[in-house]
Image: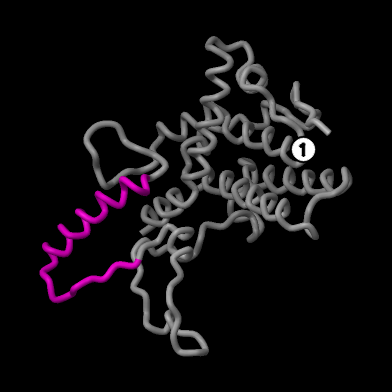
Amino acid sequence: MPQRRLVEAPHWFRLEAYDVGKLSRYDPTWWHRALSIRDDWQSDFEWRCGNQAARLKTDADRDHYWKAFLEHANLVQSETLPRHMLPEWVYPLPTHLYPIEELPAAALQNRRKSRAIAKWELDVSGKKVLLVDLSAPDTTLSEGFRAWLSIARQENPLPITRRGPKTLNVKITKHHFKTWHDYRVLACFDLDYFTRIYEMKPLSHERLFDTLNPGSAGTPKNWGAAARKALKKALRCVELLAHQIKGRAK
């Protein structure tokens, strides 16, 4: 059966609900919560699609799942509820973040006292195991790491970049938050996620423009494509945001 296409905003959608206040608009912690919960729900849905027992099979299943998502997302992005009143499960910042880790010998052992690190573990985790010669001077180690990182970043670039000369201290700035807000990436996610759950084709780029940016100038098709591109980039910044917030708190 061919998929139906969503041609207009669904009944639950209210554009004004996605107007981010000035305080939260540039708050990395707020953005981390709002993006993290959507990233987690998306991962859960993808898992369900590949698991026959957990798959959403009926409209009632989909309605229940969608209602739970909306309630969770709306609570997470609430600006009126003080942070200290948010339930513990409302998306917490990861407790432990270690951009550079020393892998203890015990971590390489199992019941048989030995365990090889599988290639797929490194491929999917985004982490690398480095062998460091501590007999070398710190200046040599620093130069060697920077040389390694320069090559590694070509193969595994960060989801954001900074204009101008290449630098190691790339951060998510107010410019990125403004872009995410202007393209209404949270609303874009929710609309597209809704169509995935209900097995519909998403809004066209043109209709997405009409829904999220009504009455504005611009080329609808290009704006809609750019909004979805901004959404993908924002979701890839979840872990980077967490590291940045943790670093700022020190």
Secondary element under disc 1, as helix, strand or loop, is loop
* Residue that appears at 30% across and 52% down: 152
Is 17 part of what is drawn in magenta? no
| Above-or-below relation of 70 to 216 | below
User: Residue 36: image x %, image y %?
Assistant: 57, 49
In the picture, which quadrant includes the C terminus? bottom left
Crowd rating for badge 1 (residues with CA inside 10 Å; few <14, some 14–19, many 20+): some
Q: Is 44 left or right of 141, judged from the image as shown?
A: right
List the single residue furthest toward the front.
1
Height in image: 130 above or below 195?
below
User: On the rendered structure, is 10 left or right of 15?
Assistant: right
By secondary structure, the bulk of the magenta-drawn segment is best described as: helix
Would you name the residue on which mark 1 appears? 199
Q: Is residue 65 left or right of residue 102?
A: right
Rendered location of residue 91, percent (x, y): 60, 54
Q: How many marks are shown on the rendered structure? A: 1
Where 31 sits versus 239, above or below? Answer: above
Instruction: State the colouring used for the structure image.
Output: one colour
Q: At 52% across and 47% down in the image, what residue appears? A: 32
Amino acid identity at mark 1: Glu
Residue 62: % across, % down: 82, 45
Q: Does 140 appear in magenta?
A: yes
Magenta residues (range): 129-157
Which residue is at the front of the view, 124 or 135? 124
Which residue is nearer to you in this view: 153 or 70?
Answer: 153
Which quadrant holds the N terminus? top right
- The part of the image, by quadrant, that contains residue 203 is top right
Q: Residue at x 53, y 45 (%)?
A: 30
Residue lying at 24% horizontally and 32% vertically, measured from the top left: 164
